[in-house]
Amino acid sequence: MPPRGRKPTPTVLKLARGNPGKRRLNENEPTPDPTLGIGEPPTDLPQAAVDEWNRLGPELEDMGVLTHVDRHTFIAYCRNWARWVDANEKCKALGEVVKAPSGYPIQNPYRSIANKAYQQCKDFWTEFGMTASSRTRIDAKPRRGGKTAADIRRERFFGGISRHA
């Protein structure tokens, strides 16, 4: 069941605005440090899936949200991405409306495939914290060295300059 209510403002935006609502920030919002990577893409992935693997995989690993335990989930995501790309290409080639065997115009069946694949991709994006609002809902443990993800974000945002100086 999807979360209810307004999507939270990402912590980095709250920091940039000076936290105008003075609400508690999620001190454990993740900015994870990658440990083990996901390796190379499987050899049986379609080319669009391999391209997405190479485009997005390194970024998610750097964020620390994609590790070796997520490999199968990421494979499924990349397959859905390729399915979405393929179905959209077929819609572009055949048109959004095609003739049914009865001769009546109908929505291209590939549009339904594309829409379903896109919805499944959106589910993965939320799981991997790939949207601004979904990152605020993830509660991660403090990183090694005693710094929380919020501490690290503040350092990155303010360039290592103390806000209280």
Image (tube, rainbow, N blue to C red):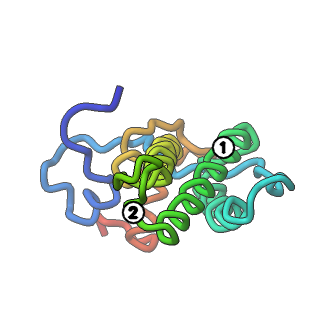
Answer above or below: position of 160 versus 142. Answer: below
Q: Callout 2: helix, strand or loop?
A: loop
Inspect the image, locate mark 1, and give the three-letter code of the amino acid beneath it: Ala
> Please, which residue is most extreme toward the top here?
1
Foreground mark, 2 or 1? 2
In the drawing, does residue 78 fall left or right of residue 15? Answer: right
Q: Callout 1: helix, strand or loop?
A: helix
Name the residue carrying label 1: 76
Residue at 66%, 43% (x, y): give it: 76
- Position of residue 54 measured from the top left corner of the image (x, y, whole percent): 70, 66
Inspect the image, locate mark 2, and give the three-letter code of the amino acid beneath it: Glu
In the drawing, does residue 21 fall left or right of residue 49? Answer: left
- Position of residue 69 measured from the top left corner of the image (x, y, whole percent): 73, 37
Name the residue carrying label 2: 96
Mark 2–mark 1 Cα distance, whole angstroms, equals 26 Å
**Of pointers 2 and 1, the one earlier in the residue sequence:** 1
- Position of residue 24 measured from the top left corner of the image (x, y, whole percent): 25, 40
Is residue 130 visible to the viewer in this orientation of the structure?
Answer: no
Residue 17 placement: quadrant: bottom left
The image quadrant where one finds the C terminus is bottom left
The image quadrant where one finds the N terminus is top left
Residue at 49%, 67% (x, y): give it: 94
Residue at 83%, 52% (x, y): give it: 44
Residue at 60%, 53% (x, y): give it: 83
